[in-house]
Amino acid sequence: MRLMIALDGMGGDGAPEVVVKGANMARSRYPGIHFHIYGNEALLKPLLARFPKLARCTSIHHTDVVVSSEDKPSQALRKARDSSMGLAIDAVRDNIAQGVVSAGNTGALMALAKIALRTMTGISRPAIATMLPTSRSECVMLDLGANIQCDARNLVEFAIMGEVFSRTVLGRTKPTIGLLNVGEEELKGHEYVRQAASLLRELALPIEFRGFVEGDAVWAGAVDVVVTDGFTGNIALKTAEGIAKMYSGFMRTAFESTILSRLGYLLSRGAIGKVRSRVDPRRYNGAMLLGLNGIVIKSHGGTDAFGFANAIGVAVDMIRGGFSNRIAEEFQRIGDFAAPLQKAAVSG
């Protein structure tokens, strides 16, 4: 199967240069890939000329309309038909590409994707998910900001989508699921979280639910999939990113403080490099918009070419793993759970 990926050439802080350089890195990793880049041809063409092999497997689709990072979703919708982001998403809808990657405005990307691709049958709301490093390996966390308020049904749907992603992309044979909560006890947390836990235990779902997990357990790798609402998930993610930057700054200051500490850095540089690589956010770049009729990947807006290439890699893994079809099959196979979930949503 030939891979066809649509790229928002103008999305992100470093666009279009980061997009083109990232695509070139991805091209060498995935032979046979073809890119459809949407954006300003006058800017994209000279960049592609620097990478002849990339140019041979890339089609440029010109538009000078860009969704900015400051645009509200309503403003983005007015630009949808002509913007680089909107056209890249439409390429998936029109079967020109199998997936789309954008480093642009997250809210706009979600709004445009929901309208162009629509949510899959059996899923009430899409969710933003990403991979995170843990002391064991990696885990998947969702939602990370698409749904500030959720009910029990939403959380159960997130659990199913996260479980399928963990199997499809991370290769977990039987992923474990946990609900993020303020404690592991059954009586703790909001009512809708406790209700979701009850449904996950009672329904005949083909998943391994481990109950509630606290924040520290996420980074310990207690479960493969961490499920929460978008408000809590976004705060947890941004807090973790802030702590990582803070400790990185602490280490840099400590190693620069004295001659001996600088010498210590030289002696331990190899080990420090391994740690830095293990927690490098660029390695985990590429948040997935799960629950849509198509593969949509959100790259961090401030990433570099290496990070953008990894976001493209997430799209490739999802396409090769048949993620969309497997999600649809999963919801069809367990269709009996729809009634109790609907009841939970109404009572919640």
Image (cartoon, rainbow, N blue to C red):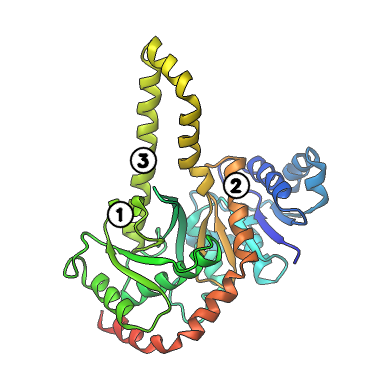
| Residue 6 located left or right of residue 165 | right
Q: Which mark is residue 308?
A: 2
Which of label 3 and label 1 is nearer to you? 1
| Callout 3 secondary element | helix
Q: What is the C-alpha distance between the residues marked 3 and 2?
A: 21 Å
Residue 328, percent from left and from top: 54, 79
Residue 119, percent from left and from top: 51, 75
When the figure is inspected, residue 114 is found, relative to residue 145, above or below; the finding is below
When the figure is inspected, residue 267 is found, relative to residue 66, above or below; the finding is above
Q: Residues within 10 Å of mark 1 (few under 14, many from 20)?
A: some
Q: Which mark is residue 127?
A: none
In the image, what residue type sits under mark 1?
Answer: Ala
Q: Is residue 147 visible?
A: yes
When the figure is inspected, residue 323 is found, relative to residue 348, above or below; the finding is above
Residue bearing mark 3: 242
Earlier in the chain: of badge 3 and badge 2, it is 3
| Callout 2 secondary element | helix
Total label count? 3
Q: Residues within 10 Å of mark 3 (few under 14, many from 20)?
A: few
| Residue 173 located left or right of residue 33 | left
In the image, what residue type sits under mark 3?
Answer: Gly
Q: Of residues 176 and 249, which is closer to you in this image? A: 176
Q: Which mark is residue 217?
A: 1
Which of label 1 and label 2 is nearer to you? 1
